[in-house]
Amino acid sequence: MGTTDMIKQSAVVPYRHVKKRIEFALITSRTTRRWIVPKGMIEPNMTAWASAAKEALEEAGLLGKVGDKPLGDFVYTKFDNRFRVELFPFRVTKVLEDWEERELRKREWVDAAQAVKRIDEPAVGAAINYLAKLKKWPGSLP
């Protein structure tokens, strides 16, 4: 199966600045309860980054500004399908206390080291480390 046969998804790496540090929002998956970032299928008639921002609202109750340049990607297999997920930066501006999947998932804010430790996917960890080390946001990063 080549890359053209993969199902395309998108995800956000949600972050916020608190004083002089950066925190990352992680959520649990619905089934395995592993720590992940919001991701899902790319909605018809939406860009990958806008679709990822929609997932952040539905899965984690987060609103904010999404970057249109991917931080990286990863591939995984589930139910005999291969998925390619693009990761986008997402600066959180509002955290909702009530959201669509609140009863299905946990949400926690952690520092970069803790986020990388909890996330199994190396590409997500690399994106978190990249954002944590930035002093100034380049180009169109939010």
Image (tube, rainbow, N blue to C red):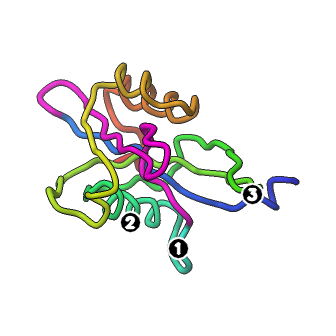
On the rendered structure, is 4 left or right of 141?
Answer: right
Characterize the local packing of mark 3: few (<14), some (14-19) or many (20 or more) Cα atoms within 10 angstroms: few
Residue occupied by mark 1: 43
Q: Amino acid type of disc 2?
A: Lys
Q: Residue at x 43, y 21 (%)?
A: 117
Secondary element at image label 1:
loop
Secondary element at image label 2:
helix
Residue 94, given in percent of the width and then of the height, sits at: 17, 55
Q: Which residues are magenta?
A: 18-41
Above or below: residue 35 compared with residue 92: above
Q: Amino acid type of disc 3?
A: Asn
Residue 61, given in percent of the width and then of the height, sits at: 25, 58
Residue occupied by mark 2: 54
Residue occupied by mark 3: 81
Q: Work out how far the residue at label 3 is from the one at label 1, CA to CA, in angstroms.
A: 18 Å
Q: Work out how far the residue at label 3 is from the one at label 2, CA to CA, in angstroms.
A: 23 Å
Q: Residue at x 20, y 35 (%)?
A: 17
Characterize the local packing of mark 1: few (<14), some (14-19) or many (20 or more) Cα atoms within 10 angstroms: some
